[in-house]
Image (cartoon, rainbow, N blue to C red):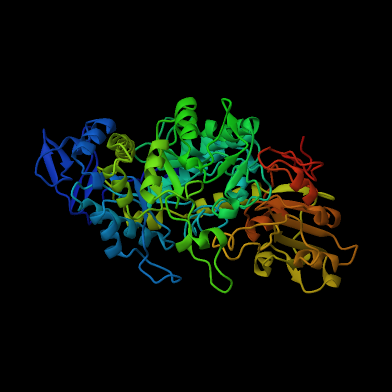
Amino acid sequence: MQRNMLAGAMGLAFSGLLAACTPTADQAELGSRDVPLIEVDGLQFRDLDKDGALTPYEDWRLTPQERAEDLVARMTLDEKAGQMVVGGLAGNAPPGEPATGYDLDAVTALVAETGVTHVISRLATGNTALAEANNAVQQVAENGRLGIPAVIMTDPRHGFTELAGASVEGGQFAQFPNGVGIAALDDPAFAETYGALVRGDLRATGFTMLLGPQIDLATEPRWPRNFDTFGEDADISARTAEAFVRGLQGGPDGVEADGVAAIIKHFAGYSASATGFDAHNYYGRHSRLNAEEWEQHIRPFQGALAASPAGVMPAYSILQELELDGAPMEQVGVGYNRYLLNDVLRGELGFEGVILSDWAITRDCSSECVEGHPEGEPPSFATVSTAWGVEDLSEAERFAKGVQAGLDIFGGVDDPSPLVEAVASGLLDEALVDAAVTRVLVQAFELGLFENPFVDPALAETEIGTPDEWAMGLQAQAESMVLLEMEGNAALAEGTRVLLFGVNEEAARAAGLEPVSNAAEADVAVVRTRSPSEMLHPQYIFGSMHQEGSLAFPSDHPALQFMNGLPADLPVIADVQLDRPAILVPFKDRASTLFASFGASDRAFLDVLTGQATPRGSLPFELPSSMAAVEAQRPGAAADSADPLYPLGFRHGGT
C-alpha cells in the first residue's frame, strides 16, 4: 500500500527496453522500445519524429505548453482530429470470450494509421498481461509519424459493483466499496489515500487517465447510477471529490508526472432524471431541476475543481426547467450546451483543462435507439446513440456544434473523419481545433508520457493487489456500512448457530460461526440482499443492465419470503446493499439488527457481525418511506421526500 501512496515505482525504465536512460539531477527519465535516443548538450532525449535532431516538442526542458504548441504546428488536420476522439481497444478474443490482450492489428489501424492516441481499455485480465498489453499499445504509438504516446484510459476498476459503461472488473486490484460507501465514511484523508492507491495501481499497469470520480449528486432515488456517486449531501460530495482527485493526480494543483488524470463526471444535473431512468437511453434523456437545485448539483464539481482535475465530462441529459441568468437552457445534451460548458464551467468556475464528452453523442440515433430492439431480438451496443437534442444533425454538424460548445475530445469515436469534414466544409474553424488539441497535448506532456510511456510488468504483478491493499479495501467495506437498527450490542460469539440467506456458508464458517439448515436449530437468522429493481426496458442494452423501477421490495421477494417464514421469536440480522436508496420498511419491521451496505463482501459483513470491524458509516442518501413519497419528490432536490424512513446522514446512535 505504501508503494501505491508514494507511487515510487511509477514509470520506471526496465530491462528489455531497447533504449533507456537513467535519470540524474538534470536528466529526465526516458524509456523507449523503437524510438532512438539522441544526445544534445550532454543530455538525452527521445527522437520521436525520427529525424536525428532535437525538435522542440521532444525537449523535456521546455514547458508542456511550449511543447504542445510546437507539436500542434507540425500536425496535419487529420492528425489533429485523431487527438480529439477516444477510440476503443479491441480485445484479442471473440465477443463474449475473455481476452488476454489487444488485437494489435486493430490497434495499429486505429493508433498508427488513424492517429487516434486517446484510447479506452476494458481489458480485464491479470496485472502482468494488462501491463504488457498496454506497453504494446505504446510501442505501436511510438512508431507513428510524430511518435505521440497513447493516453490509455479506463473506467473505475476498484469498486465493488461492475456495470458495463460505468466500471470494469477489477481482476487483481483490491476491492473497495462503491462511491456511496466512500461518501458514507465522510473521511477526506481516507479518500485521498484511496485515490493515491488507485493512482499507483493504474500507473503501474499502464493507465494514465481515469474516467472518474463520478460526482453526480444523488437526488433522484430511482436513478440507476446512484451507487457510484458520492451521495446526496453536496458538501460531503465536494470534500470527498477534492480529496480523491488530489490522491489520484498526485498533488493539489493538477496532475503530476506520475499521476493519473482525473475526469470528473458528469457536469451537471445528470442524476436529476425526470423519470428516474438513465440518460444512456432515449427514454431517460431528460433531467429536471431549477436554478436553486442547480447550485446544489454543481457544488461537488466546485469541490473537485479546487484540486485542478485534468478533465471534466459533461452529462448526457437535456436539462428541463433550468433557467440561468434569466434564460432557459437550450434543449440539447450538456455536451452540446455552449452556455454551460463555456460560460459556466470555463467562465464562472474557472476550469482550464480538457472537456471530454461522454460516449456516443455524435452517433446517429436509429429506430432501435428510440424504440428499442424488436421483441425477440437481443439489444446491442451497436445501436447506442446519446445524441440528445441533435438527432437531426449530420455527424459532421454534431462534431462542429460540440467543439463550438467547448468540447475538446469526443468519447467512443474510432473514426475522426467527420471532424475533418466539419473543418473542410467550413462548419468549424480550424483555430478551435488547434486550441482543443493544444489543451489535450499539454495534458499528455504533464503526464510524462513523451519521456517514458512504458511500465514494468514485473512490478505490476508483485506490487498491485498486495495483502495490505486488500486488507485496506476489506476494512473500508466493513467500516462504510451503516448500522440502522440494533437490539442489544453483543457481537456474535464463536460457534453461534446461524441460519443463512444470501451469505456464503464457507465464509460464515471461516468467521467462526456454525451454519445450520433449519430455524429450529438456529440462534439467529442472517439475511443479505440488494436493493430491489424491475426489468422495465429489456429491449434497450442499458435498460437490460440497469436497476430501474420501484424501490419497494415486492411481497414475493425471496428475502422477504425467507424472513416471513421464520419463527417470530428468532432474531434476524439483515443487511441490504443499497445500489439505490431502497424502501426498507419490511426489514425495519422484522429485523432486530439492520445494516445498510454499499459494496461489502460476506467476509467484511461477517467481520462486523463478529466484532472484528466496527461500522462507522452514515447514510449518504435518505431512505424513503414509500414509493408515493419517491414519486412526489423533485428529482433535482436533495433529501426532499416526505417523512423519510431514515434521513440523510442517519446512523444508529448517531447525533
Toward the right, the furthest residue is 569
- Give x and y (percent) for residue 104: 28, 63
- Give x and y (percent) for residue 653: 79, 40
- Give x and y (percent) for residue 428: 32, 39
Is 489 situated above or below 533?
above
Front position in the image: 63 or 129: 63
- Asked whether residue 313 appears in the rendered view, the answer is no
**Where is the C terminus found, in terms of image quarters?**
top right
Residue under the point 59% across and 45% down: 229
The number of callouts visible is 0
- Give x and y (percent) for residue 130: 37, 59
- Asked whether residue 57 appears in the rendered view, the answer is yes
Q: Quadrant of residue 636?
A: top right
Q: Is residue 316 left or right of residue 653?
A: left
Q: Is residue 93 left or right of residue 161?
A: left
Q: Quadrant of residue 531?
A: bottom right
Front position in the image: 585 or 618: 585
Front position in the image: 13 or 186: 186
Q: Is residue 395 left or right of residue 111?
A: right
Residue under the point 90% across and 63% down: 568
Is 561 situated above or below 39?
below
Front position in the image: 382 or 579: 382
